[in-house]
Image (cartoon, rainbow, N blue to C red):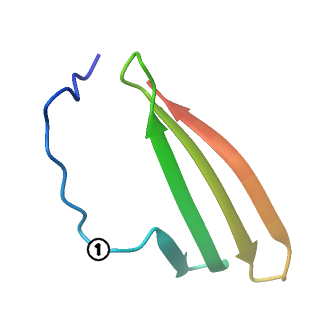
Amino acid sequence: MINYNNRKFRSVSNSYTYSGSKIRHGHLIALVDEDGSLDIRYHQVNAAGQLMIGTCHHP
């Protein structure tokens, strides 16, 4: 388990917006769970104009 307690983070960029390849536009947001894992949500529009949403969980 990763211990995030008292650690400081600095963003590489000031946006969780992404695009490229087959994704026209997307956003990503995440929280750290009590056990130290990441709880991630995303939504994006693909090259076909379809809206895609989902979740990821990274231990």
Q: With respect to residue 29, does 18 lie above or below?
A: below
Which residue is situated farthest in the front direction here? Answer: 6
Q: Residue at x 69, y 69 (%)?
A: 44
Residue on which the image places disc 1: 13
Q: How many numbered dots are placed on residues in this image?
A: 1
User: Where residue 17 sits: x, y (%)?
Assistant: 50, 74
User: Where residue 52 sits: x, y (%)?
Assistant: 78, 62
Q: Residue at x 66, y 43 (%)?
A: 55
Q: With respect to residue 47, does 4 lie above or below?
A: above
Mark 1 Cα shell of 10 Å, populated few (<14), some (14-19), many (≥20): few
Q: Residue at x 14, y 37 (%)?
A: 7
Q: With respect to residue 39, does 42 lie above or below?
A: below
Viewer-proximal residue among 21 and 31: 31
- Where does the N terminus fall, quadrant-wise? top left
Q: Residue at x 23, y 68 (%)?
A: 12
Viewer-proximal residue among 27 and 6: 6
- The local secondary structure at tag 1 comes to loop
- Where does the C terminus fall, quadrant-wise? top left
Residue 53, quarter of picture = bottom right
Residue 21, quarter of picture = bottom right
User: Where residue 14 sits: x, y (%)?
Assistant: 33, 74
User: Where residue 42 sits: x, y (%)?
Assistant: 63, 56
Q: Is residue 10 left or right of residue 49?
A: left
- Which three-letter amino acid code belongs to the residue tagged 1? Ser
Q: Is residue 24 left or right of residue 18?
A: right
